[in-house]
Image (cartoon, rainbow, N blue to C red):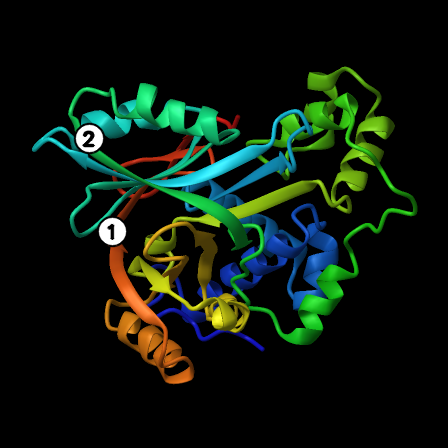
C-alpha cells in the first residue's frame, strides 16, 4: 500500500516529487540497488533515477549511513534519551559542542520545559551515567538534565519506511537484496568495509577499494554480503521538513504491562513513525512521528486512545529542528552538513 503523499510538494511537479519518494523508499529496502534494476521496477529511465538521486544528494536533502550492531560482546551498549535545559541565548553554542561528540547519536531542539533532546550511547549503564554527568552536564550553559534509560528499541530509523512503493514494487526491490548462503560472522575485514561505507552506503566500489586496500572483486563480494547479514544496518535519511513533512512529534505514553505488546504493535504500524522505544520512568513508551502539519498530532492521539482508552499521554513534544541525526550534522535549515561518525 502506498502512503499518502505529503502536502504541497516542495519542488518540481507532483509526478517528479512522487518519483523522488519512490526512489527513497526503494533505497531504504536495498541501499545499493542498481539504477538499471530500479528503473525496470518503476518503469522509468535509469538516467532519470540517477539524475534525481544526485540532485537530492547535491541539495543535501538525503544522506545514508552504514553501521554494525551489536557492538562486540565486551561492549554491551546502552542508550539513553536525555533532556537538556540551556541558559538563555546559549542553545546554539551548546549544540555546536554536542554535535562533535561521537557518543551522541542525535541532537534535537524541542518544545516544552526542555530545550534539547539527545540520544546518547555508552558501553554499560555506569559508563552511560558517567558520560552524561561528567561530559554533557558540564558543558558551559547547560542548566539541567533529565535522563530516560532505554530498555529496548522496537523500531528506529533503519526499521521505519517511507512506504511510497506498491506492494508489488516493494517485493521486487526486496528480491534484489542478496541472501547469504551461510552464516557470516563479524570480522575486522567487514568492519573496515562498514567504516568505509559509514557516511555513504552507495559509495562506489572503486572508492572503497582504494581505502581498504583490497581487490575490487573482494570488496564487491564483501559489500554484497553486508547487505544480508543481521549485524549490519543501514539508514537512508531525509531532510523531512524539506520533503513535505512540517515537523516531528514525540508522544510519551504510560502503558500498563498487559497492553504493552499490543500498543507497541499499533504504534510501529502508524504512518511515518520514526522511533518506538520502551524507557524507564513515569512514561514507559515513546513514539516519534513525522507530521504533514501540527494538526496531525491530534489524529495520531485519537487513533491511539480510541484503540487503547487506558493508555495515558504523559507528555507530547514538537521537534522543530534536528541538529544531528545518527552521526550526521545538519545545518540551521535542517539540511545535511557533514558526517561526524558513531562510536
Q: Which numbered disc covers residue 320?
A: 1
Q: Is residue 294 left or right of residue 185?
A: left
Tell me where residue 253 appears, x and y as whole percent: 35, 63
**Where 321 falls versus 165 (above or below)?**
above
Picture disc at residue 92: 2
**Position above or below: 294 against 323:** below
Q: Is residue 149 above or below residue 275?
A: above
Residue 339 shows up from this direction: no
Secondary element at image label 1: loop
Residue 250, percent across and down?
33, 58
Q: Which mark is residue 73?
A: none
Crowding near the residue tagged with mark 1, few <14, some 14–19, many ≥20 C-alpha atoms within 10 Å = some
Farthest top residue? Answer: 213
Q: Which residue corresponds to the image point at 85% horizontal and 27% vertical from the top-left?
A: 218
Q: Which of 129 and 45 lies nearest the eye of the viewer?
A: 129
Say whether residue 300 is left or right of residue 229: left
Residue 188 in view in this figure: yes
Q: Mark 1 or mark 2: which comes first in sequence?
A: 2
Q: Quadrant of the N terminus?
A: bottom right
Question: Extreme bottom residue here?
Answer: 306
Q: Are marks 1 and 2 in contact (CB under 8 Å)?
A: no
How dense is the environment of label 2, judged by Cα within 10 Å: few (below 14), some, or many (20 and up)?
few
Quarter occupied by residue 332? top left
Q: Residue at x 78, y 23 (%)?
A: 189
Identify the image quadrant of residue 136: top left
Q: How many marks?
A: 2
Residue drawn where x is 58% and y is 58% of the image: 23
Amino acid at each position: 500500500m502506498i502512503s499518502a503523499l505529503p502536502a504541497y510538494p516542495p519542488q518540481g511537479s507532483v509526478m517528479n516529487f512522487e518519483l523522488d519518494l519512490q526512489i527513497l523508499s526503494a533505497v531504504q529496502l536495498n541501499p545499493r540497488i542498481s539504477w538499471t534494476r530500479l528503473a525496470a521496477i518503476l518503469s522509468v529511465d535509469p538516467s532519470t533515477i540517477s539524475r534525481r538521486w544526485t540532485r537530492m544528494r547535491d541539495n543535501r536533502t538525503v544522506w545514508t549511513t552504514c553501521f554494525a550492531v551489536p557492538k562486540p560482546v565486551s561492549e554491551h551498549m546502552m542508550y539513553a534519551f536525555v533532556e537538556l535545559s540551556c541558559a538563555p541565548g546559549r542553545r546554539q553554542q551548546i549544540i555546536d559542542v554536542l554535535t562533535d561528540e561521537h557518543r551522541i547519536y542525535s541532537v534535537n531542539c524541542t518544545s516544552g520545559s526542555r530545550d534539547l533532546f539527545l540520544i546518547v550511547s555508552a558501553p554499560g549503564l555506569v559508563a552511560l551515567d558517567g558520560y552524561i554527568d561528567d561530559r554533557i552536564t558540564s558543558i558551559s550553559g547547560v542548566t539541567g538534565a533529565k535522563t530516560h534509560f532505554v530498555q529496548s528499541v522496537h523500531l528506529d530509523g533503519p526499521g521505519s519506511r517511507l512506504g511510497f512503493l506498491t506492494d508489488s514494487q516493494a517485493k521486487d526491490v526486496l528480491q534484489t537484496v542478496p541472501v547469504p548462503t551461510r552464516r557470516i560472522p563479524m570480522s575486522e575485514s567487514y568492519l573496515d568495509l562498514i567504516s568505509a561505507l559509514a557516511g555513504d552506503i552507495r559509495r562506489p566500489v572503486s572508492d572503497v577499494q582504494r581505502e581498504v586496500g583490497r581487490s575490487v572483486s573482494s570488496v564487491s563480494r564483501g559489500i554484497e554480503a553486508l547487505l544480508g547479514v543481521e549485524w549490519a544496518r543501514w539508514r537512508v535519511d531525509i531532510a523531512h521538513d524539506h520533503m513535505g513533512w512540517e515537523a516531528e512529534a514525540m508522544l510519551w505514553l504510560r502503558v500498563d504491562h498487559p497492553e504493552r505488546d499490543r500498543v507497541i504493535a499499533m504504534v510501529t504500524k502508524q504512518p511515518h513513525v520514526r522511533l518506538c522505544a520502551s524507557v524507564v520512568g513515569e512514561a514507559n513508551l515513546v513514539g516519534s512521528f513525522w507530521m504533514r502539519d501540527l494538526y496531525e498530532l491530534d489524529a495520531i492521539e485519537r487513533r491511539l486512545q480510541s484503540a487503547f482508552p487506558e493508555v495515558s499521554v504523559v507528555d507530547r513534544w514538537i521537534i522543530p529542528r534536528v541538529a544531528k541525526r545518527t552521526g550526521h550534522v545538519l545545518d540551521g535549515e535542517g539540511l545535511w552538513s557533514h558526517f561526524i561518525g558513531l562510536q
